[in-house]
Amino acid sequence: MNDILPIRRRSFAQGLGLVGIGASLPNFLVKSALAGPQAEADEPILVVIQLAGGNDGLSSIVPFTNDVYYRNRAKTNVPAKEVLKINDELGFCPSLTGFKELYDDGQLSVIQGVGYPNPNRSHFTSMDIWHLADRQQRETNGWLGRYVDTCHAKNPDPKLAMAIQMNKTPRAISGTAHPGVAFRDPDSFRYTADRGNKRRKDLYTELNKARMSEGHTELDWVATTANNANLASEQVRKLAASYTPHVEYPDTRLAKALMSVSAMIAGGLSTRVYYVSQKGFDTHAGQDVRHPQLMEELGGAVLAFQRDLAKHGNAQRVTSMAFSEFGRRVKENASRGCDHGKAGPMFVVGPKVKPGIYGDLPSLTDLDKGDLKHHTDFRSVYATLLEKWLKAPSQKILRESYPLLEFVS
């Protein structure tokens, strides 16, 4: 098979309206069999939670004894008496009760001062850097896509990396052999590419009648793709429809996405990486009202997810990581908000993490043009999860060697 065949296949299928490699469903088919093998019971799973917009770390993990914090946050500060104390200096904001409960249960690590050299305050550029794990953005595939391509090269199942309640496949899970799958909800995971067009529908029907031949022609490939996509979409819809959570989830978008993840895990889906997103963190104005709501949604959703996993007997094989593309500036603005900053915290959740605060809070006076300076490269967090949790060669995937941290057992 020559090198240009995958491109021909992709172009051919797209021309028929059958496939959107790395695109969201329902306009979805991918380049190889989706109905892959079931997951082994002991294989680790990583769930990534993207806090989109730039989460304010100082309003999440509050330095409640620091006078500089209160001088810079006259209107957006969290009062010391309301903080859920972690130690004598730091505490969760009062709406992060879910995280406090997980922390007290020994299932939450907080990694402070995370960022990267020469940080960028653009949402799109910084998010790409985090997704690609590449400051220069030279990579064409995401860090998790490269993980799947590297560690599951012989498994053609693109369900290995799946994004739920997202309109398009995040770059983080996009790989070469495994482009990743994204869908808004399990019920939308179905083939609807005919778009009401009789010619498309008739062509799709004919393709489904085709049989694989020894020649492995383009038509054979499209037919196989179509058939397997329908098998996979039916499997996902059935798992979601038949799932009974063992806890009550909050009525939020993030909680619904995580409940779908729990359903897929309980159903034995082959997926190794799940990706979900919580929007709304670009709090330039009214942060004192909006940010506590976001924290309540985050903590409540993750707590319910962990409790549900545990009651289904799946918690031990799942670790979750929450990140944002950057933090916010130390000094609030005139609109009761905070503008784009740099360093911020990351959160890692699960029974296999070592609970605690990792790294010191960056100085609130020694700043980088008004922003917190990072002391931990986010790729060290990635490397730790790859090496210690997913048992993957981090240097090969991240292209460089990064110090491993101690937040995973």
Image: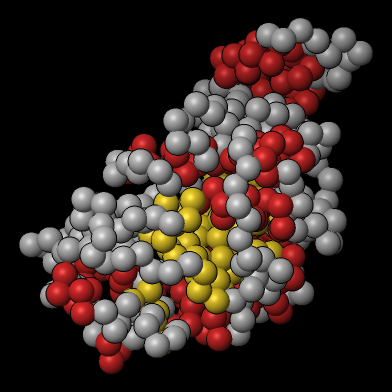
x then y, percent, for residue 348: 56, 65
Q: Which residue is at a point 57% across and 31% down the rendered structure image? A: 141
Q: Is residue 147 above or below residue 81?
A: above
Q: Which residue is at a point 25% across and 57% down the rendered structure image? A: 367
Q: Quadrant of the N terminus?
A: top right
**Residue 260 seen in this snapshot:** no
Residue found at the very far right of the displayed protein:
214
**Residue 22 seen in this snapshot:** yes
Q: Is residue 381 above or below residue 148?
A: below
Q: Is residue 231 above or below residue 93?
A: above
Q: How is the image coloured?
A: secondary structure
Q: Quadrant of the C terminus?
A: bottom right
Q: Nearer the viewer, residue 281 or 103?
A: 103
Q: Which residue is at a point 61% across and 24% down the rendered structure image? A: 18
Q: Is residue 179 above or below residue 217?
A: below
Residue 113 falls in image quadrant: bottom left
x then y, percent, for residue 228: 76, 35
Residue 227 falls in image quadrant: top right
Task: Left or right? Give the position of 294 relative to 188.
Answer: left
Q: Nearer the viewer, residue 230 or 11?
A: 11
Residue found at the very far bottom of the displayed protein:
81
x then y, percent, for residue 326: 36, 52
Q: Nearer the viewer, residue 221 or 275?
A: 275
Task: Left or right? Give the position of 16 relative to 390.
Answer: left
Q: Which residue is at a point 71% across and 58% down the rendered structure image? A: 389
Residue found at the very far left of the displayed protein:
334
x then y, percent, for residue 162: 62, 46
Residue found at the very far front of the displayed protein:
366
* Circle count: 0
